[in-house]
C-alpha cells in the first residue's frame, strides 16, 4: 500500500509537470523532503516485498518437505499392507490403480490386459484385503496414515 502511494506521488508529479497543473509552487526544501519520503517508501516496499517472498519460499520448502515425507510414508504403508496381504506383482499394480481411482477399463488399457483379467485381480485384491470395494480399500490406508488424529474425543472414549 505504501509503495503504491509513493509510486502515485512520482507519477502525479511527472504528469503535473508535463501538463502544468501546479497551482502554487512549494519551496525546494519541502519538495526534497517529500520526494525523499516517497523514495524511502518505495525502498521500504521493495524490502518488505523481498521479505514476504523469502518467507513464502521458506513456507513452500517446508510444505514440499512435508509432502515428500507424507508420500514416502504412504508408499511405506502401501508396501507393508501389500506384503501382509500377499499380493502378486500384478495385483499390487492393480491395487495402486484402484487406490488412485482408475476404473476397470482404464486399468486394463494401461496394463494392456483384458477387463476380465483386471476384474479377477481386483476381486483377489479385495478378498485378500478383506474389503468390498475401492473406497474401503482406500480407507484402510487413510486410517493408517491418520492414526485417529481427527476423531472427536467422545468417539475415542466409546471405542
Image: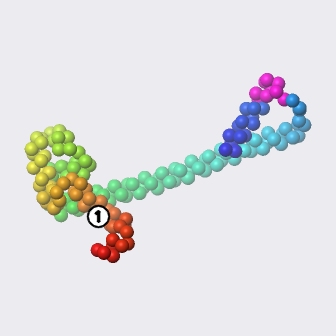
Label 1 Cα neighbours within 10 Å, binned few <14 / some 14-19 / many ≥20: some
Frontmost residue, 84 versus 5: 5
Specify whether 74 is left or right of 82: right
Quick check: 150 above or below 106? below
| Coloration of the structure image | rainbow
Report whether residue 135 is seen. yes
Magenta span: predominant SS is: helix
Residue 139: percent from left, percent from top: 26, 59
Q: Position of residue 17 (x, y in %)?
A: 80, 27
Span colored in magenta: 14-22
Query: The N terminus appears in which quarter of the rendering?
Result: top right
- Image point (17%, 41%), residue name: 105
Q: Quadrant of residue 143?
A: bottom left
- The picture places residue 158, in percent across and down from the top left corner, at 30, 75
Q: Which residue is mark 1?
A: 144
Q: Is residue 59 left or right of residue 43?
A: left
| For residue 157, above or below residue 57 | below
Residue for point 21% across, 61% down: 81
Residue at point 72% right, 40% down? 6
Visible residue check, residue 43:
no
Mark 1 lies on a secondary structure that is helix
Residue 97: give x, y in percent of width and height: 22, 48
Residue 15: name its quadrant. top right
Q: Please identify the residue farthest to the top as the structure is shown.
A: 19
Amino acid at each position: 500500500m505504501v509503495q503504491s502511494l509513493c509510486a502515485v506521488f512520482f507519477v502525479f508529479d511527472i504528469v503535473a509537470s508535463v501538463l502544468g497543473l501546479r497551482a502554487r509552487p512549494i519551496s525546494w526544501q519541502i519538495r526534497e523532503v517529500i520526494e525523499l519520503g516517497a523514495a524511502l517508501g518505495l525502498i521500504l516496499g521493495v524490502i518488505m516485498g523481498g521479505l514476504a517472498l523469502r518467507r513464502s519460499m521458506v513456507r513452500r520448502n517446508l510444505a514440499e518437505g512435508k509432502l515428500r515425507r507424507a508420500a514416502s510414508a504412504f508408499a511405506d504403508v502401501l508396501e507393508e499392507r501389500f506384503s501382509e496381504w500377499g499380493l502378486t506383482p500384478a495385483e499390487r499394480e492393480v491395487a495402486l490403480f484402484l487406490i488412485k481411482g482408475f476404473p476397470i477399463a482404464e486399468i486394463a488399457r494401461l496394463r494392456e490386459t483384458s477387463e476380465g483379467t483386471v476384474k479377477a485381480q481386483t476381486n483377489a485384491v479385495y478378498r485378500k484385503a478383506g474389503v468390498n470395494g475401492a473406497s474401503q480399500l482406500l480407507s484402510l490406508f487413510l486410517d493408517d496414515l491418520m492414526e485417529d488424529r481427527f476423531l472427536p474425543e467422545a468417539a475415542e472414549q466409546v471405542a
